[in-house]
Amino acid sequence: MKCPFCSSDNTRVIDSRPADDNSSIRRRRLCDDCGKRFTTYEKVETIPLIVIKKDNNREQYDRSKIEKGVLLACHKRPISADTISKLVDEVEIEIFAREEKEISTSLIGELIMDRLKDLDAVAYVRFASVYREFKDVNTFMTELKKMLDTK
């Protein structure tokens, strides 16, 4: 493993343990050349997953797109980065547990909204407004009423 600080190949593992999500291994490494430490994560390689977009185009699954959407929805909300990461992990685990080669963005969006609804109402409404493409205030209010009625 190359050192991210000096690019040396002369590194070694000094600690190894399961990561918080138990689906990866966290390794602390030490560069023998510069003496700096860094962390790497090892995950099981998954089968390629194709995402079916709303316009029926297909593209390879990209976790960072889910992270970006959730981060935007949670912007300036009292939600920690760890909580967001766990939410994305949960969604990803559920997606891959289906063992399907293709999945629709609508299903991914629903999985995210289910979790955001329990986490933070404002983040949920923000995500839903973009995901469901609210066209006007009435659509927005309808979604808010549904959410308030379930509480």
Image (tube, rainbow, N blue to C red):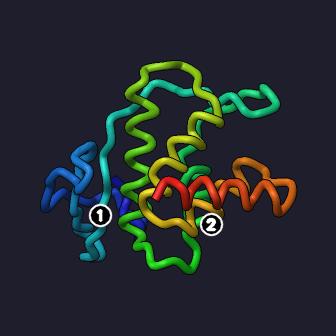
Residue visible at 45% across and 52% down? 115
The residue that label 2 is drawn on is 72
Q: Quadrant of residue 101?
A: top right
Please provide percent x and percent y for residue 133: 78, 50
How packed mark 2 is, by other alpha carbons closer than 10 Å (few <14, some 14-19, many 20 or more), is some
Residue visible at 26% across and 72% down? 37
Q: Secondary structure at mark 1?
A: strand
Please provide percent x and percent y for residue 21: 26, 51
Residue visible at 34% across and 57% down? 9
Judged from this view, the residue extending furthest toward the front is 149
Residue visible at 82% across and 31% down? 55
Q: Which mark sits nearer the N-terminus, 1 or 2? A: 1
* Residue 92 appears left or right of 10: right
Please provide percent x and percent y for residue 93: 38, 38
How packed mark 1 is, by other alpha carbons closer than 10 Å (few <14, some 14-19, many 20 or more), is few
Q: Are marks 1 and 2 in contact (CB under 8 Å)?
A: no
Front residue of this view, candidates 146 and 12: 146
Which numbered disc covers residue 57? none
**Type of residue at label 1?**
Thr
Please provide percent x and percent y for residue 46: 41, 29
Q: Is residue 92 above or below residue 21?
A: above
Front residue of this view, candidates 146 and 98: 146
The residue that label 1 is drawn on is 39
**Type of residue at label 2?**
Leu
